[in-house]
Image (cartoon, rainbow, N blue to C red):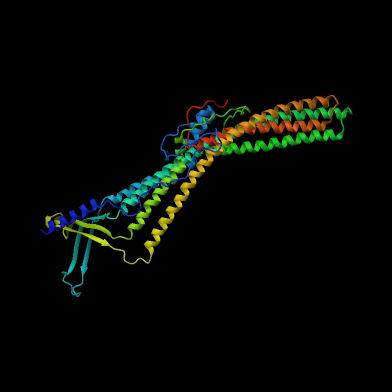
Amino acid sequence: MKMLSRIRLVLVLLTLAALAQASVGPDYVRPTNAVPATFSDVGLGSWQVGHPADAVPKGNWWTVFQDSALDALELRATTNNQDLKAALARLEQARASTRAARAEYFPALSLDPSYSRTRYSPNGGLIYPNGAIHDIKVPFDLSYEIDFWGRVRRSVESSVRDAEARAAAFEAFRLTLNAEVAQEYFSWRATETELSTLKQTLSFRQEARTLVQARFEAGAANDLELARAETELALVATELASVERRRAELKNSLAVLVGTAAPDFRLEVTELPVDAVPPVIPAGLPGELLERRPDVAEAERDLAARNARIGVAKAAFFPTVRLTGMFGWESADVGLLLDWHSRIWSLGPSITLPIFQGGRNRAALRRAEATYDEGVAVYRGRVLTAFREVQDSLAGLHWLGEQSKAQQDVVTAARRTASLSRTRYESGFASYLEVVESERTRLASERQLAQLAGQRLVVTVQLVKALGGGWGSPTDTVR
């Protein structure tokens, strides 16, 4: 009868645990954000408000540039980048922590066998017999927390949201990595175009110096003109060395991004045409693309985890109810260990009620609430940053396009001016200073045009990143 009574008590406790569905602490509600209706630059694009959807596949968005070398680099980066592997390892850690947290839903059962041989003193006044006593125990220990206040549920909720935040962080890092590879690649190609321009200019400066030297020896030019020709030649050589250094740095940066030692990295890069046209982004961008930003999703999931931890902190104010038990066998003789009369067991609940903690629990609750407030600010800041980055990229593409058109006119005029200046100098109608100034203007304008071509592609990549991934078929591509 006593056994039946204990079993009934256990069943009652387990029933109460099953019925205890309420969890202390606030239920999570995503914060609201004040959002504008459209971007300020009319005609540059629009967006719509929504919830993060970073789980939507982003796809190989870089293929819209139709560049096989870039495709190969992106594949190598996704496969070999060490920081991306570290981010994946952090994601696996978070998932493992979630599985560990869910384990608290179930009882903990352990086997604790022991053997002892004890000799008691006959003069100790004990009732034990003289000599040595053998004791063999094979018990199973059971422990289970009855989650009346939702501490376990809130802990699991927090762990699940943390894992989701780490998954979003991984996607954010992968998107950033792919964007960095594309930006460094296009910058490298633009540098190749600059180098080509400088090399052509260096060749011209060498020819000009030879011409001036010949004119000087013939008495048709003076020392000042020869000195200027030599100075211009040296200046172009200096600029060439500077751009070569920048190209080497871009190459080494790409090597790290694709997971290759810089000395072993090889890639044949072609020049970037100064009239290269980036993919045209439709003005009516789907709102889902902005919603897919993984960094916004990461902040939102992290906020949900912080909210759940408030519930964990509040649960510390309430009693902790545990069901503990033990069953097994005990005997002094191995042969009788598994005999029916050798069985041992115990079963009963335990309650831990916090009475005085010196303000520890209240401080932990305040800390959890302050951490949540911090998360709200971080989340809203990420949303504002997302809007700004899209706005910046759309405006950048628009005005860089306008600047490139104007710069092309500058290049055309500068080339014509330089050609006329050379003709006038060779005919004796102009000084060499006029040739120098016109050639400087031509070189500067051609280099700036090459830089603008690279910047337009870089900003296009930044727009893709700002939108959280790729978009539909482009209407135009890089030539």
For the N terminus, give its image quadrant. bottom left
Name above or below for residue 419 compared with residue 230: above
Asked whether, in this view, residue 244 is left or right of residue 211, the answer is left
Q: Residue at x 49, y 47 (%)?
A: 381
Q: Is residue 264 visible?
A: no
Name above or below for residue 171 compared with residue 101: above
Q: Is residue 289 visible?
A: yes
Can you give x and y, in whole percent of width and height, for residue 352 in the image?
Answer: 28, 62
Name above or below for residue 346 compared with residue 89: below
Can you name the residue that lies furthest to the left here?
1
Nearer to us in this view, 107 or 425: 425
Can you give x and y, in whole percent of width and height, for residue 151 in the image?
Answer: 32, 54
Asked whether, in this view, residue 46 is left or right of residue 97, the answer is right
Can you give x and y, in whole percent of width and height, for residue 341 in the image?
Answer: 12, 57
For the C terminus, give its image quadrant. top right
Nearer to us in this view, 167 or 28: 28
Give residue 89's quadrant in the image: top left
Name above or below for residue 221 compared with residue 110: above
Q: Residue at x 44, y 44 (%)?
A: 298
